[in-house]
Image (spheres, helix red, strand yellow):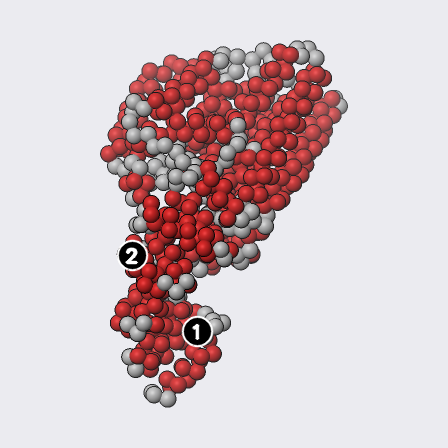
Amino acid sequence: MNTPIIHSIQRYRINIQCCILLLVLGSLVYWNHLQNPFQFDTVAYINNEHRLDNIDEQLDINFLKKQVFQRGLLQISIALNARLDGIRPLGYHLVNLVLHLINSLLIYFITCKAWHYFRLGGYHPKECEIHLISLFTAMLFLLHPIQTESVVYIMSRSEVFAGTFYLSAFFLFQTCFDQENPSKRGLKVFAFLFIPIAFVLGFSVKQTVITLPMMLFLYFALGKSPDSLLLRFLNKRKLEIGFVLTIILFLLFKKLLTDESFLIGPSTAGQDIGRLNYIFTQPSVILFYYLKLIIFPINLNLDPDIQLVTQWWSWRFWSGFVAIAGSFYFSYRVKETRFLFFLVLWFLIVISPSSSIITLSDLAAEHRTYLASYAIYAILAIIIYIISQLAFSGRSKKRKFLLLIVSILISVLFCSLTIQRNKIWASEVSLWSDTLKKSPNKIRPMINLARAHTTVGTFDLAVDYYEKVMALNPNIFATNFNLGNLYLKNGREKDALDLLKTAALLGPKIPEVHGLLGEIYLQKKQIKLAESHLKQAVEIKPNYASAMRNLGIIYYFHLRKPKEASVYFSRSLSIDPLQAEADNIRILINQTKEFR
C-alpha cells in the first residue's frame, strides 16, 4: 500500500530538484544580459515609432479585442513594462528571462510525459533515466546559444511569450491523456476551457501558435495503439483523406502563388522577394542554416546573409527538400516508436509558418527556431540514451553515469557560448560590429552600426559607415536622414539640406524629417518653406512640441500674427512643459496678450 506513495514522493522530489537546477542555471547564464540596452528595432518601437505614447489605451481590454489578430497581447506586455519601468531595460529583459525559464520547466515536464506516452520500442528506461533525459533536453532548450536572440532581444518576446501559451496548453493536454495517472473530470473540464483561451492569447502574441491544434492531434494519434479506433478509422479512410488534403493543398498553393497579400496582407517582402522565391529558399535555410546552428552553435548572426533561391531546379532547393522529405520518411518507418516521427513533425510544423508560405522580409532569423528547436534537443537526447543502452546494456549505473557526463559536458559548453553571445549584445556597437563582420555584404548592419556610433558619440566613424552605404544605395531614408543630421552638426549645411530633402521624398510620412527641414529653413529665413514643412510635421504628429514652438516663432516674429502664435506656443508648452525654451515661450505668450 505504501509503495505508490513512496514512488510518488520520490518523483516529486526529483521534479523539484530538476526545476531548481534549471532555474538556477538559467538565471546564472542570462544574468549578464539584464542591463543590456535596447537593440535593433526595439529602439524604434520604444523610442521612435511612438507605440508607447498612449499606454493607458493599450492597457485597456478593448485594445486587446481590437488588436487580437495584430499581436495585441504582445503590445500590451510591452506597454505594461513601460508603465512599470519607463524606458529602463532591466524590467523588459527580466520579463523575457522569466518567460524563458518557465518554458524550460514546461519542456522538462512535457518531455517526461512524452517518454511515458510513446515509449521507445524495446528500450525500457527506468524512471530516474527518464527524468535525467528530460532534464538534459530542458537544459539544451534553456542554455543553447541559438536561444539568446529570443531571450535577449526584447521584441523577440513574441517567440518566448507565445511559447509559454503553446507549451502550457500542450502540457495540460498531455496531463489529460496521461495513461499512468488518469486525470480527474474537473481537470479535463479546465483543460477544455483553458486550451482554447491559451490558443487565442498565444495567437495574439504571435501567429505561429496556429500550429498548436495540429500538434495536439498528432500527439494524441501517434501515441495510440495501432489497434485503436482512431488509427483504424484513419487507416481505413486514408485514400479519401489523402485525396481531400491534396485538393485543399492545391487550392491553398494556387491562392498563395496568385495573391502575394493572401494571409499576410500588403507586404514589402512580397514585393521585394516574392512568395514563390521565399518558398524555394526556405528548405535550404532549414537544412544549411537552422539545423547547422542547432547542432554546431557557432557564428550566430543577427542578420545572416542568405542566398535567395529563385529557380525550382536549384540544388539548394532540392537538397533541402530531399533532406526534409527523407527525415519525414525514415522517422515514419521507425516502427519501434512514433516518438521520433512526432519530433520530426514538431520541428517541421512549428517552424512552417515562418519558413514556408508566410513571406517575411528576412529570409532567416535565429529566434524563429525558438520553439521548433525543442524537437532537435529531444532527438539528441534519444540518440545519447540509445548509445548508452548499446554500450552498457543491463548496467543501469553506467548508463546513468554516461548520460550524466555527456549532459554536463554539453551544458557547460553551451553555458560558455551563451554567456559569450550575451556579451556581444551588451552594446549596439559590439552587436552590429559582430554582425557586419559576419555579413559584410549587407547594408542593414552597416546602417545600424553607423547609428550605434552616433549614439556613443563617435561621429567620424558614423559618417564613414553612412557614406559607404550611400555609395551602395543612395535611396534609403535612414541613411539620408541620419547622415544629413551628422553633416548639419559638422557645419556642412548644403550637403545636409540635399540629403534631408531626399529623405523627405523617401519618407514623406516621417514627422522628424519635416520638423528638421522646417527648422533649417527657418534659420535661413525661408519662411514659406519652413511653415510648409512644420505644418506637415504637426499634421503627422500632433504632439510634436518643437515643431509647434517653431510655428509659434514663425507666426509671432515673421508673419506678425500673435493670436495664432499664442495657440502654437500654448500647445508646445502643454506637450512639453519642461522644454529648454519653456520660460521664453511663457514670456512670448504673455506678450501676445498685449496685442489682443
Q: Which residue is mark 2?
A: 502
Provide the secondary structure element on which disc 2 rests: helix
Residue drawn at (62%, 24%) of the image: 133
Residue drawn at (52%, 26%) of the image: 295
Instruction: Name the amino acid type tagged 2.
Output: Thr
Decide which of 455, 197 is in the foreground and name it.
455
Q: Are marks 2 and 1 in contact (CB under 8 Å)?
A: no
Give residue 56's position: percent from left, percent from top: 47, 59
Decide which of 133, 494 is in the foreground and name it.
494
Decide which of 213, 73 is in the foreground and name it.
73
> In the image, is 301 to the left or to the right of 175?
left
Q: Which residue is mark 1?
A: 573
Instruction: Name the amino acid type tagged 1.
Output: Leu
Specify the quadrant that holds the N terminus: top right
Give residue 450's position: percent from left, percent from top: 44, 51
Residue drawn at (33%, 45%) of the image: 472
Give residue 67's position: percent from left, percent from top: 40, 49
